[in-house]
Image (cartoon, rainbow, N blue to C red):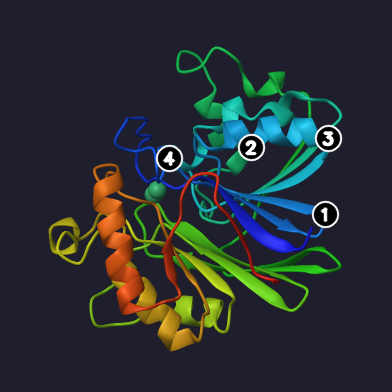
Amino acid sequence: MGFGVKFWGVRGSIAVPSPQHVKYGGNTSCVQVFAGNRMFVLDAGTGIRSLGAEFLRNDIREVNLLLTHTHWDHINGFPFFAPAYNPKWTVHIRAGHLAGNGTIHEVLSNQMNHPMFPVPLEAMRANLVMEDFVAGESFDLYPDVHIRTTPLNHPNNATAYRIEYAGKAICYVTDTEHVPGKIDERIIALVEGADMMIYDSTYTEGEFPTKIGWGHSTWNEGVRLCRAAGVKRLAIFHHEPDHDDAFMEKLEAEARAEWPGAFAARDAMTVMVDD
Ligand SMILES: [Zn+2]
Ligand SMILES: [Zn+2]
């Protein structure tokens, strides 16, 4: 099966199903990472619903959900993740951003409480194993898969992940705000030499100055990080909902002209790093 990703949701903030958002997709953040037959899911935005249906078709039975944080666009697909209701499944869920402000179990449970949602977390019959860690920690989920993390600059905190398998590395760095002219050394240390970095590219450089404090970055900063850290490919990710297909085509062309390793992530796109 190799080592790679499939994008199931690439938007930030809110899902945007519309005729102007077909090519790049309208679902919020969800990325499947396959490392051999090990399955990882980065975030549980609206894209996770379709991924869950595919998992059930393929009878995988064990998956690791790694959450960057718990803003709506990263967790509100979770109540629609069908494997979580199947008693034959084990779903490991990890989050590193809460740092003592409650637990991931509490947050996911609260999201499904009355009167916001009719089905409580307890209705999920899978073996749900939830674990909080502190962003910055590393862990081995399997003998052949190593995970490193680092905290990001985001309101209510967020965690970036580096997944290493078979001598390759895929990094997921969203949501985060950069400081213009000052490269984030924590991100550099995390993504050093990686084969791909998926990066929060919500705003253009033109939009960024009016969005200081909102917790997001630009593809240009993603390119700067990739160049500084020797990363091979940049997946432009967490697209602003107002950036429709026409806008994204132009943005992607500009990014590729600046750095050929850049591409804009789209729903249903698969990218391998071991070919
Ligand atoms: Zn987000
Ligand atoms: Zn966020």
Q: What amino acid is labelled 3 in the image?
A: Asp
Q: What residue did someone put label 3 on? A: 59
Residue 51's label in the rendered image is 2
Q: CA distance from mark 3 to mark 4?
A: 27 Å
Q: Residue at x 55, y 45 (%)?
A: 268
The disc, 2 or 3, on the residue closer to the chain's N-terminal end is 2
- Which image quadrant: the N terminus? bottom right
Q: Quadrant of the C terminus?
A: bottom right
Between disc 3 and disc 4, the foreground one is: 3
Residue 9: in sight, yes or no? Answer: yes
Quarter location, residue 199: bottom left
**Is residue 96 positioned above or below 240 on the image?**
below
130, above or below 180, in the image = above
Q: Position of residue 107 (x, y in %)?
A: 53, 36
Q: Quick one: label 4 or label 1, which is nearer the N terminus?
A: 1
Look at the numbered disc 4 and give the secondary structure of its residue. Answer: helix
Q: Is mark 4 within 8 Å of ligand 1?
A: yes
- Residue 73: give its label: 4
Residue tagged by mark 1? 37
N-terminal of the pair, mark 2 or mark 4, is 2
Rate crowding at label 2 as few (under 14), some (14 to 19) or many (20 or more) other CA atoms within 10 Å: many
- Compare marks 2 and 1 and give the one earlier in the sequence: 1
CA gap, disc 2 and disc 3: 12 Å
Indicate left or right for 185 with 67 as reference: left
**Residue in the image at 70% along x and 18% along y:** 123
Amino acid residing under circle 4: Asp
| Quarter of the figure with residue 254 | bottom left
Residue at point 69%, 21% (across, down): 122
Q: Earlier in the sequence, mark 3 or mark 4?
A: 3
